[in-house]
Image (cartoon, rainbow, N blue to C red):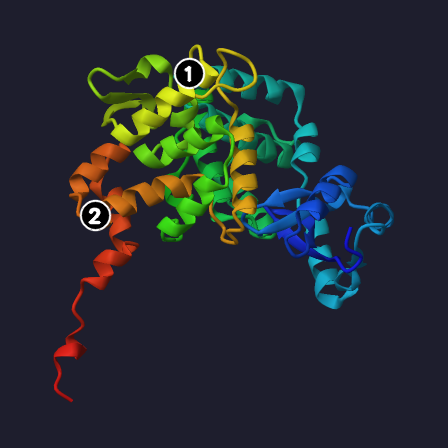
Amino acid sequence: MDAKLKIKLSLAIHRERPVVKVIFDYNRKLIEELKARTDAQWSVNMNCWYIPQERFVLNEFFTAMKPVAYINYLSLKNKDSQQLNNQATRNYSPSVMKKRIQPATLEKIDDFRMWLEQKRYGENTIKTYIHQLGIFFGYYADIEPENITTQNIIAFNNDFILKNNLSSTFQNQTISALKKYYLYKHNRDLNAENLERPRKSQSLPKVMAKKDLKRFFESIKNTKHKIAFETIYAYGLRRGELLNLKLQHIDTRRGMISIINAKGKKDRQLPMSKRWLGKVKSYYRTYKPKIYFIEGQFPGKSITAGSLQKVFERALMESKINKPYTIHCLRHSFATHLLENGTDIRYIQELLGHKSSKTTEIYTHVSKESLKNIKNPFDDMDI
């Protein structure tokens, strides 16, 4: 191991919790040592390794990594980091709050969960609603759910969400969960006029440049993993749509792929790529999946979202793409590249399964080729 390797430690807030960032120049051997000796995890958004602060002990980290690298931990002691640390200690602990919930309230939440499952709400929606209710009713553990008022909810927003600097998404999810819960469980329609939702930020979708896509795909050596991400890009799939894609949904005779029970409980059909089909035949002969198109370590079971995420992060790291891309960026890239190739936006809407054309129109704001074709009026001025 090169004695000149250096690691810098600093504090940060990641996904609303305090973490210690582990920063160093890319080095494969150092990464392997870090993974073997510590609990460090990779973050695409921060573009570095990190350790949750509750699991970080400086002496232990120093002892573990000192043999392989010089460790600079001075920034952990500066004033900015101390302020960040103070902010972090004020942040809530979901597990602690949920432990405060009364047994009777837990039964009501569980009953609500079963109702959501019977109504066939998506798995992620159910998980989010139950999580938000757990935090809310943990905060108001001394009040029966039926006695909660609109003023209590407003106070929760002001005294908990805003003071902990939680996201607008967290706020919206809490309101949605409470509205649904009270309408079902207590037949109460919460006063919508007093529960104002935060304005959503109009951030543009992140699109992977074609040269980055090429590097990304070339960095994946495992055929199964490579075809998984190529499929997401080739058809603009959501992650869950790939995970739920079964062999029976792929009709090679008609040249069509069926996406069943996608977001909004909608089905759609997609024309098959000939180049993709050629690669799939080779993949199928090698791996012989039984039920799902991409299966994990257990035959007949789909690959997990967590496994797919780990492969994606590793591929980004291997290809040395230092940009905050996510798996969903492959879907954004598919739509944007179609638009740049001249595909009518109404067809793109159909391929993506968007209910409204307004959702699809956001890609007109990120298409570089479309912007390049706009003639600047300054060019016509003879000055």
Q: Comparing marks 2 and 1, which lies closer to the viewer?
A: 1
| x and y percentages locating residue 8 in the rendered image | 73, 59
Report the disc number at residue 285: 1
Q: Which residue corresponds to the image point at 67% horizontal and 47% vertical from the top-left? A: 50
Q: Is residue 155 visible?
A: no
**Residue at the limit of the structure toward the bottom, as seen here:** 383
| x and y percentages locating residue 68 in the rendered image | 80, 50
How far apart, in angstroms, are the residues tagged by discs 2 and 1? 33 Å
> As drawn, is 98 to the left or to the right of 361?
right
Front residue of this view, candidates 264 and 58: 58
Report the disc number at residue 341: 2
Q: Which residue corresponds to the image point at 52% horizontal and 16% vertical from the top-left? A: 111
Q: Which residue corresponds to the image point at 56% horizontal and 46% vertical from the top-left? A: 317
Mark 2, Cα crowd under 10 Å, few <14 / some 14-19 / many 20+, is few
Q: Is residue 10 visible?
A: yes
Q: Secondary structure at mark 1?
A: helix
> In the rendered image, which quarter is residue 176 located in?
top left
Q: Determine whether 301 is above or below 134 in the image.
A: above
> In the rendered image, which quarter is residue 283 located in?
top left
Q: Given the image, on which type of amino acid does mark 1 rest?
A: Arg
| x and y percentages locating residue 338 in the rendered image | 24, 44
Q: Given the image, on which type of amino acid does mark 2 rest?
A: Asn
